[in-house]
Structure formats: C-alpha cells, structure tokens
Image (cartoon, grey):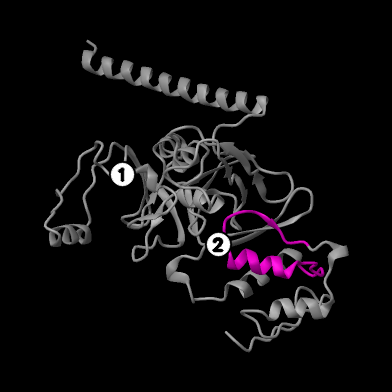
C-alpha cells in the first residue's frame, strides 16, 4: 500500500520542480527577448567587443515633487553619483524643469570579468551574470571606522525576510544613549537588512537590501554592502551560491573606448586611505600601463584635474596634436601645486624621470 503522505510530498516536489523550470524558462525567454530587441533591463549592459567603457551619460528633466534621489534611483544611480554629477542642484528640492545629468557611463574595473566585483571608492557593484553581459548597481559600503574589507570571497547562504541581530557595538552605543535596541529585529519595515540578504564567506558581511533606500550610494553601513530593494531582489533570485565576490578599491580608472579614446574616471578617496599613497603618481602609473611601451600623448593638466577634482565623469586624457603645449609650458603647468619639478620624456614612455621636491 502506498504511503499517502509520501505520495503527496513527491507530487509536491514534482510540481515545485516544474514551477522552477517554468520560471527559469520564462526568465531566459525574457532575457533573450530583451537581447533581440536591443533593450536590456535596468543596469544591464552588453560587454563591448573592444575597450572597457559601457553606457552613456544623458540628461532628464525634473518633474514636480521629485527629489534628485528619486531620479537617481529610477535611473540606477546612488546618492553620491547624483550629487557629484549635479553639484548645483538641490538634492531634496530640485526646481521642476531643471535638466539633471544621469552619469550612466562607466569604466569597467581592472579586475577579472567573473562573478561579482565591488569597487568601494566608486560605490558600485558589477555582476558578470552571463556571457556578453555585465550588470552594475549603486551600493552603500561601510562608513569610516567600519570599512568594508578588500579581498576575494564567495556568496554562501541566501536568506529571504532575514532576522537582524544588532551587533554588540551598536547595542552598547544605543544603551549609552538610553535607547537599548531589541536583541533581534524581525522581518518588516524596521529591519535594516530589507527583505533579501546574501551572506558572504567573510564572517558577518552580507550583501543585502535596506529599509532606508535614500542612503544607497554613500558610506552608511557598518561594513555590509547595501543595495536598493529592487536590485538585491533581482540578484537574490539569480546569483548562485558560491559565486566569486571580488572586493577592490580603485578610485582612479582608465580605459580605451571602442573608438580608440583613452578615458579616465576618478572618485574621491576613502577617508581611511587619504595619505597612504600619492594619487597623481598612482594615476600616472596607471596611464603608463595603458600605453605600454608606446609614447603617451597625454593632456597632463587634464589628468591632474581629474585626480584632484574627482566627480565620476569620464574624461578624455588624449592631447589634441595641434594643441600640444611647448615643453616649457607643460613644465610650468605641472610645477603648480603638488610637483616642483617633473621631467617627462615622450621617447621612453610616459615619463623617464620624476623628481619630487615638495610633497
């Protein structure tokens, strides 16, 4: 005689398996449909055949009642990205009719195109989800004193509607204020983890949602990586356990575009890294690597401006031949500020001798 309970369980298992297959087929069909129409979902980009530049910047018009953060979230940009791209526009009360910049052009990080890559200074996550496609989303990372660690790890367990246990340091801080938090915060609107969490191999670190989406795109967490609720939900459904997560810090990036232009993209240094290295020297070394053994026709004044005034926008570093400055003019430009003497030889690469007398 058949066990009716076992029979029901087997039937339920088959049904669930069929449902999962159907959902997977539907998702794949949607992706293929998006590919065939040339339109990809929010945050998805085709990897370029040549170069490492994806996306493009564009402008939109502020509607009545919108904040800059509302616009940024709709267009896949976080707090700092919108603030830097629109320094003259109010974050909370932009004037209706104002044109604002959506900085949706990115240089891919200098890291293997595998799994998830998190660039801390950029406050952005990249996910190489399938061949020929990269996804990118704004994130929050650990604030000063709770820095998100650099390193390679992997995703482990995925949890929907997670409970949250405030860490000891937070409980102590709250108790000192006379506001002791509960030992465990259940799922719901007060849970800072949001509705989806992906645990990492680094103990106590997660990629998760948030109940305060206005903070996405800034340093606001105690080390975890926060995402907009809709973004983490999408990743939660598709990122397999065991996916590599490469956490890097690249405040200055360069890349060749498909049409042969060398672009740079620069972001503010994390507070804990200020003073640990010289940003301009670091940038010049990165540019030199991009050219290899070839002479580097670089606009050095432009390079310095990009490094000293980081705003996340892509800027061409190539010097126009007919506007090439005389050697004495170039030396005078570089002498102002950080360098007191800098000799550059185009015959042997980007620079053959670097003399720094004032740091």
What residue is disc 1 on? Answer: 193
- Looking at the rendered structure, the secondary structure element under dot 2 is loop
Q: Nearer the viewer, residue 246 or 142?
A: 142
How far from the left and from the top, in percent, is residue 62?
A: 52, 36
Q: Is residue 180 left or right of residue 313?
A: left
Residue 317 occupies which quadrant of the picture?
bottom right
Residue 123 image point, x, y percent = 48, 53
The magenta region covers 292-318
| Of residues 84 and 45, the one drawn nearer to the viewer in this rendering | 84
Residue at (57% x, 28% y) in the render: 31
Between discs 1 and 2, the one toward the N terminus: 1
| Residue 307 placement (x, y as % from top left) | 61, 66
* Magenta-colored stretch includes residue 311: yes
Indicate the quadrant containing the N terminus: top left, top right, bottom left or bottom right: top left
> Which of the image's four quarters has the C terminus?
bottom right
Q: Most extreme residue toward the right, as rendered?
A: 322
Q: CA distance from mark 1 to mark 2?
A: 26 Å
Give the residue at the far top of this rendering: 1
Image mark for residue 250: 2
Q: Residues within 10 Å of mark 1 (few under 14, many from 20)?
A: many
Q: Nearer the viewer, residue 319 or 206?
A: 319
Counting from the top left corner in percent of width and height, residue 214 is at 38, 44
**Horizontal arrangement in the rendering, residue 300 relative to residue 216 (left or right):** right
In the depicted structure, whether residue 283 falls above or below residue 207: below
Pick whichever, 75 or 281, lies toward us. 75
Compared across the picture, whether 187 is left or right of 29 comes to: left
Q: Is residue 87 magenta?
A: no
Q: Are marks 1 and 2 in contact (CB under 8 Å)?
A: no
Image position of 358 (left or right of 276) = right
Q: Is residue 271 above or below residue 112?
A: below
Task: Name which residue lies at 52% across and 22% down.
Answer: 25
Crowding at label 2, few (<14), some or many (≥20) Cα neighbours within 10 Å?
some
């Amino acid at each position: 005689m058949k066990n009716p309970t076992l029979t029901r369980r087997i039937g339920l298992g088959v049904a669930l398996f069929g449902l999962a297959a159907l959902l997977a087929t539907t998702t794949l069909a949607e992706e293929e449909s998006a590919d065939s129409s040339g339109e990809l979902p929010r945050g998805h980009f085709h990897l370029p055949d040549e170069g490492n530049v994806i996306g493009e910047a564009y402008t939109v018009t502020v509607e009545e009642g919108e904040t800059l953060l509302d616009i940024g979230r709709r267009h896949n940009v976080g707090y700092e990205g919108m603030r830097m791209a629109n320094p003259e526009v109010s974050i909370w009360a932009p004037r209706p009719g104002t044109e604002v910049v959506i900085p949706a052009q990115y240089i891919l990080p200098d890291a293997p195109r595998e799994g998830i890559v998190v660039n801390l200074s950029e406050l952005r996550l990249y996910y190489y989800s399938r061949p020929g496609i990269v996804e990118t989303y704004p994130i929050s990372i650990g604030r000063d004193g709770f820095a998100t660690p650099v390193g390679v790890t992997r995703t482990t367990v995925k949890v929907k509607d997670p409970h949250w246990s405030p860490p000891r340091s937070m409980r102590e801080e709250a108790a000192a204020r006379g506001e002791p938090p509960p030992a465990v915060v259940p799922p719901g609107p007060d849970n800072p983890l949001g509705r989806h969490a992906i645990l990492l191999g680094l103990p106590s670190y997660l990629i998760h949602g948030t109940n305060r989406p206005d903070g996405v795109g800034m340093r606001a967490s105690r080390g975890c990586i926060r995402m907009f609720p809709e973004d983490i939900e999408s990743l939660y459904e598709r990122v397999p356990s065991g996916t590599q997560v490469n956490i890097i810090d690249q405040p200055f990036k360069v890349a060749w575009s498909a049409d042969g232009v060398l672009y740079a993209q620069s972001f503010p240094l994390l507070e804990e890294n200020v003073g640990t290295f010289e940003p301009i020297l670091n940038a010049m070394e990165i540019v030199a690597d991009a050219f290899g053994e070839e002479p580097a026709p670089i606009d050095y004044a432009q390079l310095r401006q990009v490094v000293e005034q980081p705003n996340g926008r892509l800027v061409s570093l190539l010097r126009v031949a007919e506007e090439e400055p005389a050697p004495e003019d170039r030396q005078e430009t570089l002498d102002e500020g950080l360098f007191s003497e800098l000799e550059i030889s185009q015959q042997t690469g980007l620079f053959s001798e670097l003399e720094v007398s004032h740091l």
